[in-house]
Image (cartoon, coloured by chain):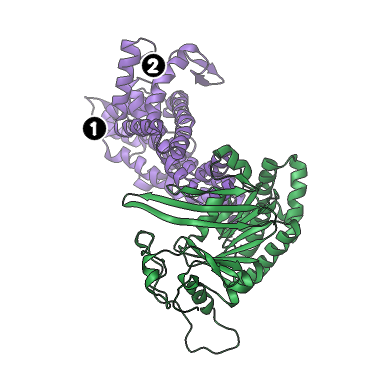
Amino acid sequence: MTAPLLEVRNLRVEFPTRRGTLVALNDVSFSIAQGEVLGVVGESGAGKSMTGAAIIGLLEPPGRIAGGEILLNGRRIDNLPYSELRKLRGREIGAIFQDPLTTLNPLYTVGAQLIETMVTHLPLNPAQARAKAIEWLELVGIPAASQRIDSYPHEFSGGMRQRVVIALALCAEPKLIVADEPTTALDVSIQAQVIALLKSLAREKGTSMMLVTHDMGVIAETADRVAVMYAGRIVEIGAVRNVVRHASHPYSAGLMGSIPPVGRRLDRMQQIDGSMPRLSAIPPGCAYNPRCPKVFDRCRVERPELMPAGDSLAACWLYAEGAPRHA
Amino acid sequence: MFAFIISRILQALPVMLTVALLSFAMFAYVGDPVAIMLGQDYTVAQRDALVADLGLDQPFFVQFAKFVVNAAQGEFGLSYRLSRPVAQLIVERAPATLELALCAAFLALAIGVPMGVYTGLYRNSWLSRFFLTFSLIGVSLPTFLIGILLILTFSVWLGWLPSFGRGDTVNVGGWSTGLLTWSGLKALILPSITLGLFQLTLIMRLVRAEMMEVLRTDYIKFARARGLTNRAVHFGHALKNTLVPVITITGLQLGAIIAFAIVTETVFQWPGMGLLFIQSVGAADIPVMSAYLLLIALMFVTINLIVDLLYYAVDPRLRIGRGKGAH
């Protein structure tokens, strides 16, 4: 097996507050191979976006990486000085944020923002960069790109702006894209287009992607593997096929079960009772135990690590020896 | 653009007419000009002759109309105190005040903006804390006290700078300037600091607050995620987005600097319009007072128009709405 492009080992992110330290990410480990798309799902506040922010080194202070390491191509990047990290951003790791209405600077034309990004990272003169910028706009499907390059962000629709954001994230040809809910703020009809674009561009350029979302449909269609997060930890990770069809962890099973089926009438939608614990009140043992339908004694005492469960890895005692009964 | 300017000028007309009414009313209700002009001893016949001569027996609105027509041509009559045309007095004094005001505004911007950017970026550094403490002094100490303290320090104790007056001036095409002589420049320093200190601290605090606001936005985060240099992020992306409120306040403050140069000019015996005004108040020299009032109103109206035009130069989102009626 070749070395993965991105490797995250035992990542721990803390937020020191007045009332004590909150652990936002605890012992998160995963890797992304060259050209692979890893989907990351979970409820709001599970730590999905936090993981992405930690990888690009943009945690909001006072949040900080308190342990573990992040390796890109085998090189440690979580402890780089700011100036080194800056050169990495955009060039090696691109980012796409949730809301295209707020991620573009309103006072600069989209062309100026593209050119600025490319000139910062690539050995291009302004004229070459402008030609490249037009190419990129065409590539992401902006009609009449050579005229639209001088338009300001507010002159584009939401979907078009997200296409511009994608062009901006990809224009310095990074090896990894961290896409944080790239379609959540868009119209449903636009979402599919943007995802398709992202997917085809990533495939074309051989770019790996970490796709953070809570839209299972997007994951099923785009990702190769999926990581399910709960309360700052990965509870299950495996190939999309396995996790979507036969989720091992009761939480993943609950998530998949709450996707309404197409073509069948339901009187009630399935749901997971209760809500995710606050970071300051994570229960002992497995963090999911108060909501878990299959909870047993061990879950309330001891915290499970990821362990083989079918074809995936799940952090659940059901898959350890001596569990009462397999799910 | 042209239509916009015209509409703003039309909007300014009622403002100017209202101020004109007020400044005209001063003639009728503040003191009795006839009594002032005649002195201690006069006969009833002399008085009636003067009243008829001055047109004071005509109806109020006829007098007001005459006043407006004259004022529009820059004709404000004779100063009671100096028996010279008011317009001539003001034209003589205007360069002194304008040079002082522009110099103070320049100081306030050239020092206030960088200080604001610095304190916005490095909120917790000791230098930021020092600047903020220092700005409290600027905001809370009254102008005359600052002026007197500066005179005490730099003129009385150190003897470096003159304590009053404009120094030598050079006449350049009817504009007497102190900017071209050494003594003129030296004389300008203390009054400019005195007049500009409050505005400096105000601008610094405004830029700081705006920077802190802007630095939290998604587009700044995205600019960082694209790996742009700190300089490009801070000065290109962040500072430009703080400019609209800064321009507004600077414009209004420039008007205020000119209008309220009175105190500074009095402390430093600066031969400008403010000093002329305060001396005229002492002598109930109503033509000068009313002309000054109108002039300041005109200045505010003009500055506001320029500020509005600058908005369009800075923020492209406003340009669309104006021309095509879109939003």
Q: Identify residue for label 2.
A: B165
Position of A192 with respect to B12 (left or right) is right
- In the image, residue A254 above or below residue B291: below
First in sequence, mark 1 or 2: give its number: 1
- In the image, residue A231 above or below residue B137: below
The residue nearer to you, when weighing A64 against B66, is: A64
Q: What is the number of the mark on residue B44? A: 1
Q: Colour of chain B?
A: purple
Residue B172 lies, in percent from the top left, at 55, 19
Residue drawn at x 68%, y 55% as measured from the top left: A167
Residue A1 lies, in percent from the top left, at 69, 57
Residue B240 lies, in percent from the top left, at 55, 43
The residue nearer to you, when weighing B56 against A256, is: A256
Q: Is residue B154 visible?
A: yes
Q: Chain of mark 1?
A: B
The residue nearer to you, when weighing A230 against B243, is: A230
Q: Colour of chain A?
A: green
Which element carries disc 2, helix, strand or loop?
Answer: loop
- In the image, residue B286 above or below residue A221: above
- Of badges 1 and 2, nearer the viewer stands 2
Tell me which amino acid carries mark 2.
Answer: Gly
The answer to which image quadrant residue A163 occupies is bottom right
